[in-house]
């Protein structure tokens, strides 16, 4: 591990020299790539340097043990240095885990009402609001590109894009079935009802990563509509694109411009087809590795929002760590939950690496 860390430190020094080269300033693509690499390598090198300092502190404390007057102080400093080294060793192991290549990408977010009729649609609307508030907290930009509402303000289906640094890394564990237990607004007898909504989170695929043959597309235009189906636009600016080989359909009616709607619909279609391709490639591995933190499978119940008990329970976590305050979560304070899922995922990957002898 130390040899690998030394090479990473040398690479960071090389990247920093390149970034200080005036010739790089004029190459925007190179500048962006190097800056991203610097951002990824810096935490690893900082932890490595701290680890080296902890080892030096251990050596100095060990020397103190041979002096009777300094022995007690040396024992205290040695214990502290050992604890710090162990902490940094664990941190370095996590930092050296291979990164998900999609982590820095923007996101295509889909929310669909599940069981529960109108209550399921109202819960889907709550989830859309929750993610909108979370995006605002993180400095992300969430744009709804397609929205199918009910007359009571529920959401049958919503498609949104989320743009921002690390958007996919923060939202990828949200994929799956979200269940809610509460007394519905439409329930007069006060009975608690269980409803659900599904969330899909896809990394936005770049055109260079996944190309689509225009001959495989059927593009239709229509007038956009609001809740209850009434038309809200007199021009046919809404776009429906069908990928004929797979039957995948994407609609976009958010913009007044037909061109902008088509551009957004193509981004979403590309991301959907890219995700399907990735899932096909990873199917054999996914079948052998059932992750505790989730695979993004919409059929799996990942979380329950229990309003009577003021609690959100994430079923991929264990013990007290799986429960969160429902008011905080539903109002977009998702970071504590997402951080817990990320740590659990990292711990599992480290355990798998240990079992394989890596």
Image (cartoon, rainbow, N blue to C red):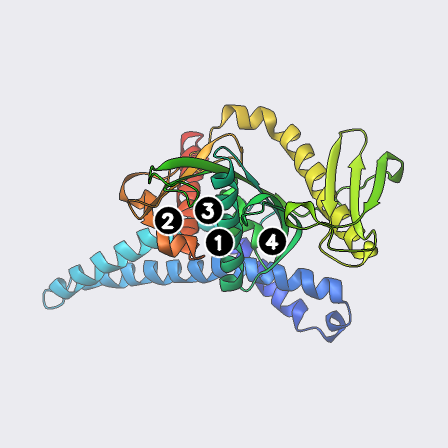
Q: Earlier in the sequence, mark 4 or mark 1?
A: 4
Would you say residue 323 is visible in this rendering? Answer: yes
**Mark 1 nearby-residue class (10 Å; few <14, some 14–19, many ≥20):** some
**Mark 4 nearby-residue class (10 Å; few <14, some 14–19, many ≥20):** some
**Measured Cα–Cα span from mark 3 to mark 2:** 12 Å
**Measured Cα–Cα span from mark 4 to mark 2:** 24 Å
**Measured Cα–Cα span from mark 1 to mark 2:** 33 Å
Q: Quadrant of residue 58?
A: bottom left
**Measured Cα–Cα span from mark 4 to mark 3:** 25 Å
Q: Quadrant of residue 241?
A: top right
Q: Which residue is mark 4?
A: 104
Q: Which residue is mark 1?
A: 130
**Residue at the right extreme of this rendering:** 215
**Helix, strand or loop status at disc 1:** helix
**Helix, strand or loop status at disc 4:** loop
Would you say residue 65 is visible in this rendering? Answer: no
Q: Earlier in the sequence, mark 1 or mark 2?
A: 2
Q: Which mark is nearer the camera, 4 or 1?
A: 1
Q: Residue at x 33, y 43 (%)?
A: 322
**Measured Cα–Cα span from mark 4 to mark 1:** 21 Å
């Amino acid at each position: 591990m130390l040899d690998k860390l030394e090479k990473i430190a040398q690479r960071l020094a090389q990247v920093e020299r390149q970034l200080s080269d005036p010739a790089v300033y004029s190459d925007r693509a190179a500048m962006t790539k190097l800056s991203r690499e610097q951002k990824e390598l810096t935490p690893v090198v900082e932890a490595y340097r701290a680890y080296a300092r902890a080892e030096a502190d251990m050596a100095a404390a060990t020397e103190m043990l041979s002096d009777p007057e300094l022995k007690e102080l040396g024992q205290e400093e040695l214990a502290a240095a050992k604890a710090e080294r162990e902490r940094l060793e664990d941190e370095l192991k996590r930092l050296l885990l291979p990164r998900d290549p999609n982590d820095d990408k923007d996101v295509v977010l889909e929310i669909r009402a599940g069981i529960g009729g109108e209550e399921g649609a109202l819960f889907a609307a709550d989830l859309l609001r929750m993610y909108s508030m979370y995006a605002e907290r993180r400095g992300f930009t969430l744009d709804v590109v397609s929205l199918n509402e009910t007359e009571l303000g529920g959401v049958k289906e919503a498609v949104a894009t989320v743009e921002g640094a690390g958007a996919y890394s923060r939202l990828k564990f949200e994929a799956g079935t979200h269940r809610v237990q509460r007394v519905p607004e439409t329930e007069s007898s006060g009975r608690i009802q269980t409803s659900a909504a599904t969330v899909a989170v896809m990394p936005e695929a770049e055109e260079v990563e996944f190309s689509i043959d225009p001959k495989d597309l059927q593009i239709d235009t229509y007038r956009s509509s609001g809740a209850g189906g009434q038309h809200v636009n007199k021009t046919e600016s809404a776009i429906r694109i069908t990928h004929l080989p797979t039957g995948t359909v994407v609609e976009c009616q958010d913009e007044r411009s037909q061109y902008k709607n088509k551009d957004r619909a193509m981004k979403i279609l590309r991301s959907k087809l890219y995700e399907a391709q990735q899932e096909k490639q990873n199917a054999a591995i996914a079948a052998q590795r059932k992750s505790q933190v989730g695979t993004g499978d919409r059929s799996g119940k990942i979380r329950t929002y229990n309003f009577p008990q003021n609690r959100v329970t994430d079923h991929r976590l264990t013990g007290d760590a799986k429960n969160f305050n429902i008011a905080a979560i539903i109002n977009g304070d998702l970071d504590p939950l997402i951080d817990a899922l990320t740590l659990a995922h990292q711990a599992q990957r480290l355990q798998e690496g240990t079992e394989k002898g890596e």
